[in-house]
Every structure is written in structure tokens, then in C-alpha cells.
Amino acid sequence: MEAGSGSPALPGGEAHAGLEEEYALEAFDHREGYCRKLGHYVRFSYCRRRPEDFGPPRGEAAPLPCGRVADCWFERLPVEAYLRSNYSAEELKMILAPPPAKLDSILEILARLKAEAGS
Ligand code: SF4
């Protein structure tokens, strides 16, 4: 199985056909797909709960899924309806926000190290 490309647009209030379906958080945990990021197959359960990699902690709530979840799974799962069933509009924006550019990340790390060295 190969992950797809060209994810559907999610946040916002646009009308989407077939999105009235509700899905439990664990509904697709057993499904497997090839992860281009990791280079091997993973279960959907992996994609939806990697707090250390994929999102800030949400207290008692489930962690946010990988930011690529819509792009990787939209051809094989009703991933848009799934995400809408389990995450708020605000969470969807966080999940689907583009990752920071590498240079931005490096500059952020340098600024943090500099601040730590100064304190
Ligand atoms: S959603 Fe993330 S972890 Fe899952 S297959 Fe895609 S890139 Fe890999």
C-alpha cells in the first residue's frame, strides 16, 4: 500500500458530501498503510497517537494525530469524516498546520539554546 498525496481541505465550515457519518476514535486502528516518513508500514493507531512527535499534550484527551494523516489516508479511509468526528475545528487547524520550515526550526532551537545559556 502506498500513501496518497493531495489531501482534502478540512478546517472551516464548507459542506462536504458524506461527512455526516460519525466514527469512533479507535475505528480504524487496525488498518495498515505504508509510511513514507518512516519507510515502513504502520497501523492507523500509530498515526493518531504520537504525542511526542505529532502534537502538544491535551491533558486527559487523546493526543493529536500526525499532521500528514489526511494526506496519507484519504484514499483508503473516510479520514475527513473521521477527523471531524473526533477533533474540534481548532484541533483540526493544529493537526493540519504546515510544519515549520527547517530553517525556522533551526533558528528556534538556536534561540532556545542561547536563552538557556544566558540564564
Ligand atoms: S500519517 Fe504520519 S505516521 Fe502515519 S503514515 Fe502518514 S506520515 Fe506516517
Image: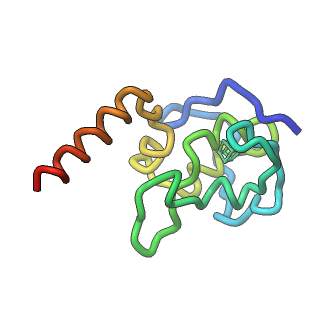
Q: Quadrant of the N terminus?
A: top right
In the rendered view, how is the structure colored?
A: rainbow
Residue extending farthest right: 1
Residue extending farthest bottom: 60
Among the 4 quarters of the image, the one containing residue 19: top right
Residue extending farthest front: 117
Against 36, residue 55 (above or below) is below
Judged left or right of residue 69, residue 92 is: left
Name the residue located 46 percent from the left edge and 53 percent from the top edge: 55
Q: Position of residue 12 (x, y in %)?
A: 45, 35
Count the labels in the image: 0
Question: Residue 102 versus residue 117: which sits nearer the camera?
Answer: 117
Name the residue located 23 percent from the left edge and 40 percent from the top edge: 111
Question: Residue 74 versus residue 35: which sits nearer the camera?
Answer: 35
Q: Position of residue 45 (x, y in %)?
A: 71, 61
Q: Quadrant of the C terminus?
A: bottom left
Residue extending farthest left: 119
Judged left or right of residue 61, residue 111 is: left
Name the residue located 39 percent from the left edge and 48 percent from the top edge: 90
Q: Position of residue 37 (x, y in %)?
A: 68, 39
Judged left or right of residue 113, residue 106 is: right
Against 50, residue 99 (above or below) is above
Q: Position of residue 23 (x, y in %)?
A: 68, 59
Quadrant observed for ligand 1 in the rendered image = top right
Name the residue located 46 percent from the left edge and 34 percent from the top edge: 99
Judged left or right of residue 78, residue 93 is: left
Among the 4 quarters of the image, the one containing residue 73: top right
